[in-house]
Image (cartoon, coloured by chain):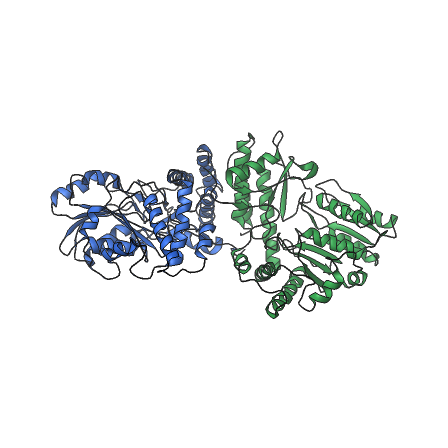
Chain colours: A green, B blue
Amino acid sequence: MKPIKKRLLTPGPTMVPERVLEALSRPTLYHRSPEFKEVFLETRELLSKVMRTEGEVLILTSSGTGAMEAAVSNLFQPGDSAIVVVGGKFGQRWEELCRVYSINPIVINVEWGRAVDIEDVERALKENPDVKGVLVQICETSTGTIHDVRGIGELLKNYPDVLLVADGITAYGVYDIPTDEWGIDVAVTGSQKALMTPPGLAVITLSKRAVERIKPRNYYFDLKKEIKQQNKGQTAYTTATNLVVALNEALKMIVEEGLENVAKRHKVLAEATREGVKALGLELLSSNPANGVTAVRCPEGINGQEIVRVAREKYGVTIAGGQEHLKGKIFRLSHMGYVDQFDVLTGLEVTEFALKELGYEGFKFGDSVRAAMEVFYKNGV
Amino acid sequence: MKPIKKRLLTPGPTMVPERVLEALSRPTLYHRSPEFKEVFLETRELLSKVMRTEGEVLILTSSGTGAMEAAVSNLFQPGDSAIVVVGGKFGQRWEELCRVYSINPIVINVEWGRAVDIEDVERALKENPDVKGVLVQICETSTGTIHDVRGIGELLKNYPDVLLVADGITAYGVYDIPTDEWGIDVAVTGSQKALMTPPGLAVITLSKRAVERIKPRNYYFDLKKEIKQQNKGQTAYTTATNLVVALNEALKMIVEEGLENVAKRHKVLAEATREGVKALGLELLSSNPANGVTAVRCPEGINGQEIVRVAREKYGVTIAGGQEHLKGKIFRLSHMGYVDQFDVLTGLEVTEFALKELGYEGFKFGDSVRAAMEVFYKNGV
C-alpha cells in the first residue's frame, strides 16, 4: 500500500508541535509594530532561559549556518588563528568559514564518530599561544557525537583571550546546557532542531567578552547593529515574524516541560534507540553518542541510502543517511524535539522493515522494539 | 515522564488528516452562498461514489444518532413493526428509537460479540409477515463485530415491502460497500469515523422505495424537506459549513486512494491488530471481527477501564473501553480512517505498556509488535 502519512524523523527539520503550528498560522505581524516588539523581547528572554545565559541573545533570520558565519565574521579578524575541531561535516563548516574570512584554522582532526580528546585541544593551545578562539560542535550532527565542550570550557579558563565558540544546533533543547557556567562565549543554534520550530531562524548568544570583540565584516550579519536593534525589540532587517511567534510558543513548551525533564526525556529516547539498534546486531557509529540523533553503521553489504529510500518511499518515514565519506555507510535516526517513545519505536520499526526488505537477516521483527520498550519501561516512561 | 503528545485511537472521533484540518480552517462560508452550494453538491456526489449508491444522499448536521433517528422517524409509522438486530449498544439504539416512535421492535437478540444468524432473520420475517423493515448494524462498534448485511439484503429480495436499514457508521470508509447492490435501502454514517472528519455531520442514503415511504414525524429531521433543499445545493436549516468543506476534502482523499485500496488497507491493519493481541495471549471478543475496530477481552483479573486509563494518563494514547455489561471486560483498539501500520503498532505498544504496568505477565515486550509486523510484511505493507 502507498504510505498515507508522512513522518519526519530527521535531525532537522523536526516535527513541529500542533501548538507551534497554530502559532505559526496566526495573522502576520508587522516587524516594527508594538505587538511584535513584545513577542520578540519575550522570545529573547525565553531563549536566555532555555540557553541559560545572561549574555546577549540575538535572533537571526537565517539557517544555523548563518549564525555560524555571524560568529566567525564578527569575532575574528583576517590573520587571526583559531583552533577548529573537525570531527564531521559541521566541524568542516567551521573550517570553511575560517578560510572564507581569512582566519587561520588550526585543525584538530578527529575520526568521524569520535569525540575530540581534550588533551589535543590543550596541546594545540600551548603550541599556538596566539589563537583567538576554539570552534567546536557541542553535538556533531553528522556523526551523532558529543564533544566535551564543558571540558574545553574548563581548559579555557586559563586562556582569557581565547573565545569558546560552540555550535549547539542539535544540542540546545536536547540537553540542559548552562552556557555561561561552561564558559561558552558564543553559542549558535537553529529553530528547526530541538527548538521544535520550522526552519528559518537562528540564534546566537554572546558573552560580555565576545561582545567587546565584535568587529562586523559583512552587512547582513552585523552583530553590533543587531545588538543595538534587538535590545529595543527590533531587528536590523525584516525578520520572519511568523516564525518568531512560533518559536515563542515552542520555547514556552520547553519551559513548561522543564529543562531538566526535557533533557531526561531525550536521554531516555536516545538510550532506547541505541539499545534498539544494538538488538538488531548493528553498531553505533559514535563512541560518545549524542542524545538528539543516533548514527548507526549499516550491516555489511547494505547501503544506508537504500535504507533511507525504502523508509521514505514505502513507509512515508523520512530518516537521514550519512554525509561525505559516511554516505551509504550509516543511517541516522533522530529523536530530538517533539518526539516521544512511540516516535522512537516507529523509527525502529521502519528500520526493521527496510533492513528486512534489503535482505539483512540478522534479526527477527520486533527485536529492536522489545529492547527499546524495556528501556522505556525501566525508566518509568 | 508526562506524555508530550496526544494520540487518538478510539473508534470515533478518529484522527483527522492534515489536509482535512487545513480545509476545516478555511474561512467560513455562508450556507446560502453559490460557493457553498458548489462544495455541497460536490460533497454529495463524492458521498454517492464512496457509498456506491444512486439513491438520495443527504447530509445532516448531527451525530450519527441523528441520522438513525431520521431513518426511524421518517420511514416507519406508529404501529409498524420492524425486526431489530440487537447484538450490542448500537443495536439497542435502534430498539430504543423504535420505542420512542411507537414502532413495535421485533428484537433478535444476539450475544454481544457474535454476528446475527441469517436464519434467525429469515424466521422472524416469516413469523411476522407485516414487518416494514429490518434494522441492523453493518459493524456493531461496541463489540467490533460485522453482521452479514449482504446476506440479509439477499434474503429481503423476497420481501419487497421490507426496508433494509443499515447503520454503517463504522463501516463506510472501512469497507467498500456497494449499498445499492446489497439492497440497503437506508444507510447511515457519521463524519467522525472512517470518513476522517471531525464530529458534527451525519449522512443518510435512501433508495427509491425508501424515498416513497417517507412521512416525516419531526421537524429537524424532515427528510422530505431535506431532499427538496439538498437537490438544490441547500439544506433546510443552517448546516456546519466548515465541516462540509472538511468532509469534501476527506472524501477526495478516499477517492484518490481508491475504495478498494482503502478497504484493503483496513483489512491488513485489522489482521495485524488481531494477530498482535493474540500474540499477547489475549482473545478477541468477536467471532466475526470487523476491520475498523478490534474488541479484546481483558486478561483475568485486569480491568479494561484501567488499561484505558493508563494508556491515556501515562502514555497520552486514547483507546476505548467496553460499554454496558462489557465495561471493564474488554478494551477496543481502533484502526479506521487516517491510520497506518505505525499507528496500529503504537496501539499495540501502549497495550503492552499498560498490561505490564497492571501486572499481566503473559507476554514479553514486543510480542504483539512482532506478530503485527509479520502480517504487514507478508502483505507487502
Question: x, y percentage for residue A363?
Answer: 54, 33
Residue A198: give x, y in percent of width and height.
Answer: 59, 53
Residue B171: percent from the left, percent from the top? 33, 45
The N terminus of chain A is located in which quarter? top left
| Residue B348 image-quadrant placement | top left
Left/right of residue A374 with respect to residue B31 in the rendered view = right
**Quick check: B171 above or below A180?**
above
The answer to whether A241 is drawn above or below residue A323 in the figure is below
- Relative depth, front residue between A374 and B25: B25
Please state which of residues B228 and A376 is positioned toward the viewer in this rendering.
B228
Query: Could you tell whether A144 is left or right of B158 in the image?
Result: right
- On the question of residue B198 being in view, the answer is no
Query: Which residue extends farthest front?
Result: B34
With B332 as the anchor, is B342 left or right in this view? right
The picture places residue B22, in percent across and down from the top left corner, at 47, 54
Which of B319/A252 is in front?
A252
Q: Name the quadrant containing residue A54.
A: bottom right
In this view, which residue lies farthest toward the bottom? Answer: A34
Left or right of A247, for residue A180: right
